[in-house]
Amino acid sequence: MTNRSPAGKNLRLLANRKTFGLLAGLALGAALLAGCSSEGASTDCGLDACTVTFDRGVDARASILGVEAQLIEAQDDVVTIEVAGEQLSLTVGQQAADVGGLAVTLDSVTDSEVKVRIERNAG
């Protein structure tokens, strides 16, 4: 005779729900990360933030966190980028600029690349 107690059944259901929740979370995370694409740039993204490294001298753009980011111009230490349709002029060390619920910061500028961090605003 097999013991089929309600407690054992509840434990199996709970374990199945936890497994399903974990798998659903992983699938959502993979879908968000897979949503990143770029041309003339590389991206390093998490769920709420991306670092975009734009190549200078090319038409560099990236689609991240549901928006398009494009390097417009880099002259000395001033960089103009377009994020979510809005142009920003940034310098290294400047406080983050807010655009459509995103905080945009210029991390570094070299002769060959521009590195920008774009993250969702907390709140």
Image: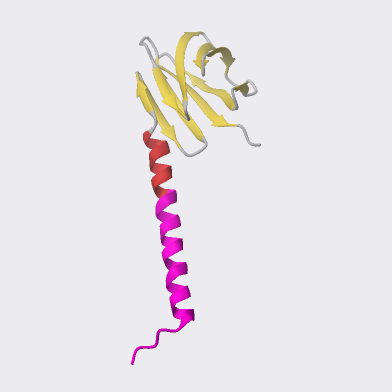
- Report x, y in % for residue 59: 37, 11
Count of picture labels: 0
Name the one closer to the observer, 14 or 71.
14
Quadrant placement of the C terminus: top right
Residue under the image location 57 percent in, 24 percent down = 105
Q: Quadrant of residue 60?
A: top left
Name the one closer to the observer, 5 or 68.
5
- Report x, y in % for residue 116: 50, 23
> Residue 9 colored magenta?
yes
Residue under the image location 41 percent in, 58 percent down = 20
With respect to residue 32, does 21 lie above or below?
below
> Residue 22 colored magenta?
yes
Q: Which residues are magenta?
A: 1-25
- Report x, y in % for residue 26: 41, 49
Q: Which residue is most to the bottom? A: 1
With respect to residue 12, does 35 lie above or below?
above
Q: What colour-coding does the image apply? A: secondary structure
Quadrant placement of the N terminus: bottom left
Q: Tell me if 87 is positioned left or right of 16 in this view.
A: right
Residue under the image location 62 percent in, 22 percent down = 98
With respect to residue 105, does 8 lie above or below?
below
- Report x, y in % for residue 54: 41, 19
- Magenta stretch, main secondary structure, is helix
Residue under the image location 45 percent in, 20 percent down = 68
